[in-house]
Image: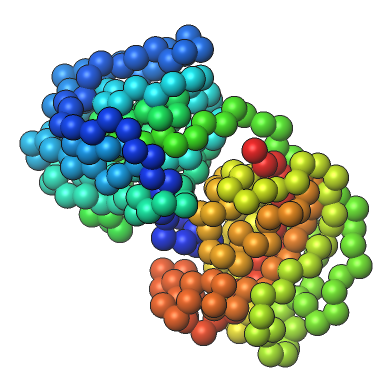
Amino acid sequence: MKKTLAVKKTLSALAIAVLAGSLAACGSSTSADGCTPTASGSNSSKVTVTGKFGEAPTVKFDKGLSTTKTERSVVIDGKGAGAKANGTVEVDYTAYDAATGKKIDSTTYKKGSTTAFQLKDSSILPGMIKGLTCSPAGSRVVAVIPPADGFKATGSEGLGVKGTDSLIFVFDVVKVTDPVKVLPKADGAAVEPTAGLPTVTLGSKGEPTVTVPKADAPTTLTIANLKKGTGTTVKAGDTVTVHYTGVIWASGKVFDSSWTRGEPASFATTGVIPGFGKALVGQKVGSQVIAVIPPADGYGAAGQTSAGITGTDTLVFVVDILATS
């Protein structure tokens, strides 16, 4: 599965109407650029998918399905170049525990938002990378993934997946982006800090330490530059690669940080909480931004329990914009 990013909102998807019908997953297809995908097999062929691309599929298989290697089958052929290693894909997906038959995760398949994955080891499960690599935009693919390419022997307690359970993913590949140069940290010119906002000090690698003032948080979305870059401007809907740290204003506690995980995160500007997306659009690559996000532009009254965020918490993000496409 994707790494947990508290910044992500409930994910929705770009609906694209194409061929419908009940299709058993068929063999792997070589993409237009000659990329050789992971092969299909007897297990991936046992998964039957019904529905249109961009809409939540109906997926049928016999529970207890198990595999010892990742298999990939194509349900709908896309067009164009396939996704490359270290590139980015924007997808809708539905995931199942093949042993129990239970759905364990999915996007919402609503128009206007997708989730982005970078096809890079340690970013997502190895089996997801194998299933998505070589897949062009417009394709729907099935990946049947063994524990070795999934959650391994530890499984996932939060998702109810045992260490012996295989996984099934159905991916709708909405957009494919080739690898782009990614900065290690924001390299823009420093900007005079804005009075009243949290102060930021940087470590040797660029990682921020955020100190929240002993004052009430702003009640409206507040965005300011700490560094101004000179790279490509981020547009609405772009897939951005960033390093970020998120802090709860009331406690000063860090609730999420890509720096702690040791690698940047990639996602669509439309696939995150509103205030975070607004802080990115219009900025240039190389910039470092601080955003103070009230609940209305964050997680709303529901908060985000898993991250320790209540419905009244204002959030602070320091974001290094490393690439966009």
Figure quadrant of the C terminus: top right
Where is residue 277, by image quadrant? bottom right
Instruction: Name the side, left or right, on which 106 lies relative to 274.
Output: left
Residue that appears at 56% across and 65% down: 274
Query: 36 or 156: nearer the eye?
Result: 36
Where 43 sits versus 90, above or below?
above
Q: Is residue 93 visible?
A: yes
Figure quadrant of the N terminus: top left
Can you give x and y, in whole percent of width and height, for residue 136 in the image? Answer: 45, 25
Residue that appears at 83% across and 49% down: 229
Can you give x and y, in whole percent of width and height, for residue 231 in the image? Answer: 81, 42
Determine the residue located farthest toward the bottom in the rendered image. Answer: 215
Residue that appears at 32% across and 33% down: 18
Can you give x and y, in whole percent of width and height, for residue 172 in the image? Answer: 36, 36
Residue that appears at 75% across and 61% down: 289
Coloring applied to the structure: rainbow
Query: 120 or 14: nearer the eye?
Result: 14
Where is residue 210, by image quadrant? bottom right
